[in-house]
Image (cartoon, grey):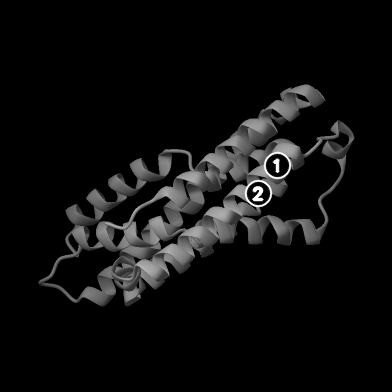
Amino acid sequence: MPLELWIAFVLASAALLAVPGPTVMLAVSHALNGGRRTALGTVPGTMLGDFTAMTVSLAGAGAVLAASATLFTVLKLAGAAYLIWLGVKLWRSKPDPAVLEQSIAPASMRSVFLQSFVVTALNPKGIVFFVAFVPQFVDPAAPVLMQFVVLEATFVILAGVNVALWAMAAGTLRSRFRRPATMRLVNRIGGGFLIGAGLLTAAVRRA
């Protein structure tokens, strides 16, 4: 793979990831409520989710989803429903400032990991996007498989770094959000974003 093609992919991916999405909002919400250590649980979940989505896409599932209205609709509605459920749960949560000083339990960390994984991986819009996005940076004159491996590893690492930076930044500002009213507002903004993302996912039409 030519170096300039890889650099172009890095820049395009970084620009794409810089726009806050459902996974980033999930990490920010966890950082504000449970601290940076809790929010960092979204990093491996996000990386595994992107790895899963890209692998499935490049294995041909993206083409199948693009060709089958039924499969696309089922996966789309499942992902949308999960996003809306997370949003409603976050909206209705009642933050307690005393919880901010408590250490996170292993089970909660697993929950954070699974939430971020499902939100990232169970996104048909992302799967179809990878099918259209990644091949643009592949040199047809060189072995395709190795190029896919390089591009997938690059995107997954960038996605992990992006979420980690958001989590760290939100965790640093966590001390400013100790008032229950402020935390409740943040939760409702994040919940509203997740609900909106779920509704937009449900409204996506097959190209």
Q: Residues within 10 Å of mark 1 (few under 14, many from 20)?
A: many
Tell me what residue is drawn at x 47 percent, y 68 percent. 52
Residue holding disc 1? 90
Describe residue 16's horizontal placement relative to residue 87 as left or right.
left
Q: Is residue 118 above or below residue 166?
A: below
Assign the N terminus to one quadrant of the image.
Answer: bottom left
Q: Is residue 127 above or below residue 19?
A: below
Across and down, in percent, residue 32 comes to: 70, 35
Assign the C terminus to one quadrant of the image.
Answer: bottom left
Residue situated furthest left in the rendering: 141
Across and down, in percent, residue 121 comes to: 50, 62
CB under 8 Å between callouts 2 and 1? yes
Residue situated furthest front in the rendering: 70
Tell me what residue is drawn at x 39 percent, y 51 percent. 204
Whether residue 190 can be seen here: yes
Rounded to the nearest angstrom, the CA distance separating label 2 from label 1 is: 6 Å
Across and down, in percent, residue 4 comes to: 18, 52
In-front residue for pair 14/189: 189
* Type of amino acid at the residue the image marks with label 1: Leu
Across and down, in percent, residue 157 comes to: 45, 56
Tell me what residue is drawn at x 44 percent, y 59 percent. 156
Describe residue 115's horizontal placement relative to residue 146 as left or right.
right
Q: Which quadrant would residue 151 be assigned to in this image?
A: bottom left
Residue holding disc 2? 86
Q: Which quadrant would residue 78 be assigned to in this image?
A: bottom right
In-front residue for pair 123/153: 123
